[in-house]
Image: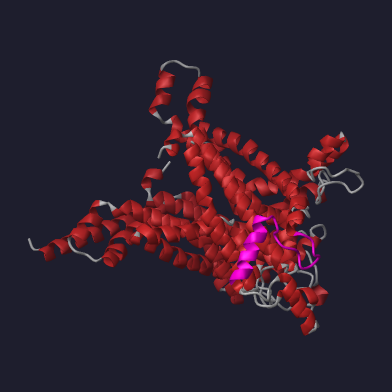
Amino acid sequence: MLRYIVRRVLGAIPVLFGLSVILFAFVRLLPGDPAIAILGQHATPALIQQVHQSLGLDKPIYIQYIQYINGLLHGDFGYSIINGRSVLSDFAHRFPGTVELTIGALIVAVGIGIPLGRLAARHPNGWIDGTVTVISLFGISIPIFVLGYSLVFIFAVQLHWLPAAGQLDPRIDLTPHTNMVLIDAIIDGQPAAFVDGLRHLVLPAIALGSIPLAIITRITRASVIDVSNEDYVRTARAKGLSERRVNDRHIMRNAWLPVTTIIGLEVGGLLAGAVITETVFSWNGVGSWVVDAIQDHDYFVIQSSILIFAVIFLMVNLVVDIGYAYLNPRIRYG
Amino acid sequence: MTAGSTTVAVRAASTRASRGLWRDAFQRLLRNGPALVGLFCIAVFVVGAIFAPFIAPYDPVVGKIVDRMQPPSAAHLMGTDLLGRDEFSRVLYGARLSLQVGVIAVVFGLFFGVSIGAIAGGAGGKVDAVLMRITDVLLAVPGILLAIGIVAWLGRGQLQIMLAVGVSYAPIFARLLRGSLLALRESDFVIAARSMGASAPRILLRHMLPNALTPLIVQATLALATAIIDVAGLGFLGLGPGDPRIAEWGEMLTDSARFLQSAPYLIFFPGAAITISAIGFNLLGDGLRESLDPRLKR
């Protein structure tokens, strides 16, 4: 098991190296001069020279790359050219918001997807199965922003049941400990803030969770049907075991494997989907931060945030693969 | 029997078999209800896109400011937007852009992906290892984020969007094709071709690729659904074509988002257009998968 983990971690290093080269080249090859982006069109050559020096842009390209990597290894991901703030500290400030949203979406996807998939598998090709199939088809076909606005229109604009945007009612005073509203509310012992935070989370979590919900439903259904047709399930029934026991001990234990893999794969997709969801719901996370950076042409923020996203994505995939290898010995020794 | 006549016989047999496979698959597709619904959705949008200039009752770009923000009516089936432009005409012209950009993006993705996958799966060894590490790098960035990065890099425009979305799909196609090719390398008909002295490129192009196409066709059809959503997503994030002369579904949504309360129809119609075309390609892709691989039939 340890050998497998070491092999996978070492395997991620060349990928990160390649990505850093591409992203570095991406920012250096951009049309336009970062110095002009910082100083504006009417900067004097002397000032431009000065900015070049301070950013190290006057040095040869390979020295620049070494400095860039050196910086990354020391936790220096560069500074925003718009407001001069450190990319890493801005990321750290906003990331908890995205984590909160992602976990909410994952709970929606897993909490609804698995029961729906099991329900459909119990009566394959019946009307329940048909309905579930249609729901999952909609889930993968409706863009997050269309679903997001539809939810806002129905539940916020028409019914006034839930808030349309944001993370917390601005009238509620909450000390940011972790920048996750629900956790902060628990730490501060404010049940009202917790309920309000939860109400703000519902619609974005459903919008973001819709795609993984659809995929988890499909995979669960297929996996349960597959396993139900296995000989050992028939044997278990023939032994006279109760239907509940057959379900829990024989079917679900084996049906879990593909479902856990897909849940892990979907976490990466959720991080990408957060970019759009946060824009729709004015959610204060890294997604809306990246979008702002794109609109402001804040290249260093774009470069570093994509790199950080990729690192997190790789780490999540790694954890999932290790978990999967733990659950399934055939992979470990394969 | 001479070597020549053997080849002819083998070729005749393989043509017969492959024609049979496709005809069978097509027959099964025609009996697949959901796939037909998908085909119908796609047909509506392709017809709308191609004949937009004849169907659209108004100019999609120039509107009458006196007609602004009208709800749906007989004169304006889907209402009018802030600049008094007819929403129905804009949705039709948007179909044109979405289908065109989506299809070309997937073609780009197939071109890059198939090239990489064919070289990797055909050559094997070090070439394969290097190419697969490159796809690993691309796969390390979630698709839409990669596309966002590329458009931010290349600047806004139709070609840039097609490239960005295409490049983000390329590693998926490359992996898929490479996997199928690797599985085929040791199959009997490839060994037979090799033993008859066929050159490596010939074996790859004539014997292996045609047999590895099925999963690629299915994936490309499903990718069309994602491409339409991703293109609209880029438009929604302000990375659309950025040309006021072009109606784009994602940009139409962003422009109208602040009128959600007063004019929800401006969100509903382009949103429904994106969703229905994505449903069409998803249904067709699933149908193709089932009909090309009868073992999957429920």
> What colour scheme was applied to this rendering of the protein?
secondary structure
Identify the image quadrant of residue B146.
bottom right
Residue A83 highlighted magenta (yes or no): yes
Residue A203 highlighted magenta (yes or no): no
Where is residue B164? Give x, y as percent: 57, 67
| Residue numbers of the magenta segment | A62-86
Q: Residue furthest top?
A: A240
Q: Residue furthest left?
A: B1
From the viewer's perspective, is residue A139 above or below residue B10?
above
Left or right of B171? Residue A94 is right
Left or right of B165? Residue B116 is left
Where is residue B12? Give x, y as percent: 20, 62
Residue drawn at (51%, 38%) of the image: A324
Where is residue B119? Give x, y as percent: 38, 64
User: Which of B236/A317 is in front?
Assistant: A317
Q: Which image quadrant: the C terminus of chain A? A: top left
Left or right of A161? Residue A127 is left
User: Which of B56/A288 is in front?
Assistant: A288
Where is residue A65? Give x, y as percent: 61, 67
- Can residue A218 be seen here? The reply is no
- Can residue A242 be seen here? The reply is yes
From the viewer's perspective, is residue A178 above or below residue B184?
above
From the viewer's perspective, is residue A94 above or below residue B134?
above
User: Which of A236/B271 is in front?
Assistant: A236
Q: How many marks?
A: 0
